[in-house]
Image (tube, rainbow, N blue to C red):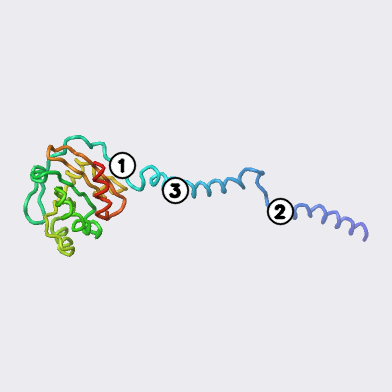
Amino acid sequence: MSRQTDSNKKQASSRAPAVRNRSSPSRPAPGRSWELPKVWTWLGLLIPTVLILGVVILGGGEVGDSANVGSRAPEFALPTTLGTEVSLDDAVAEGDALLYFSMGVGCDGCFAQIPEIEVPLRDMGINLVSVMVQPSSHVAETAERFGIHSPILIDEDRSVSTAYEMLGIYGHSDRPSHSFALVGPDRTIKWVKHYSTMFVPLDALVVDLGAV
């Protein structure tokens, strides 16, 4: 009887380590897989922050002047919301013309921008020429809601917006963002500014134009 008991104890003790091994969690080698997830977590948080700071610090929240400043302005002749046609020659016939390229329909600030600056700019001897890329009827409907009765040029095929390098600003590949190009009577592009906001107060725009 005692032999059988001793035999049972030996069998039980030989199985005990196997039970402990099954219940013990396997730990990764120190300094490797436990630290790796932490690294990726920090990188995931850090990279977007760096990109945002880069835009703000390098551009002050705005994209700088385009490379075409100082070059001859591309010619154009576009239909308008009033059923007329306006060309570059028409735009600069009486002095400087400020071409205003915006997102258009769907952007209320873009339409509110026109009455904000149109008359004051005219008093300064600058002709505001607004350009949008949506169908004329859609643009005219929204313009009416904002009390805009001046013509808005329609660049539906984006050819003029492309020629003036107004596409692809702030991620908008199919339409302009909120950009201005000042063209002189000699057809030279004197100044270009891409704003990160969809509405620029008159005072701020005048200050920027004063640097020209």
Q: Crowding near pointer 3: few (<14 within 10 Å), some, many (20+)?
A: few
Per the image, the residue denoted by label 3 is 48
Q: Is residue 41 left or right of residue 156?
A: right
C-alpha distance separating marks 2 and 1 = 61 Å
Q: Which residue is mark 2?
A: 24
Give the quarter of the image for residue 13: bottom right
- Please name the amino acid that badge 1 sits on: Gly
Q: Residue at x 16, y 37 (%)?
A: 188
* Foreground pick, 56 / 46: 56
Q: CA distance from mark 3 to mark 2?
A: 40 Å
Q: Are marks 1 and 3 in contact (CB under 8 Å)?
A: no
- Residue 120 in the image, given as x and y percentages of width and height: 18, 54
Task: Report the residue at 46% width, 46% height from top.
Answer: 47
Q: Residue at x 16, y 49 (%)?
A: 124
Nearest-to-viewer mark from 3 and 2: 3
Q: Is residue 188 above or below residue 204?
A: above
Q: Which residue is label 1 attached to? A: 64
Q: Nearer the viewer, residue 125 or 158?
A: 125
- Are the residues at dot 3 and dot 2 in contact (C-beta closer than 8 Å)? no
Which of the two marks, 2 or 1, is nearer to us in this view? 1
The amino acid on which the numbered mark 3 sits, given as a three-letter code, is Pro
- What percent of the width, then of the height, locates residue 202? 24, 54
Instruction: Decide which of tag 3 and tag 2 comes sooner along the chain.
Output: 2
Disc 1 residue crowd, few under 14, some 14–19, many 20+, Cα 10 Å = few
- Determine whether the residue tagged by mark 2 lies in a helix, strand or loop: loop
User: x, y percentage for residue 169?
Assistant: 29, 46
Q: How many marks?
A: 3
- Secondary structure category for the residue under label 1: loop
Q: Is residue 167 left or right of residue 137?
A: right
> Which quadrant holds the N terminus?
bottom right
- Residue at image x 8%, y 56%? 82
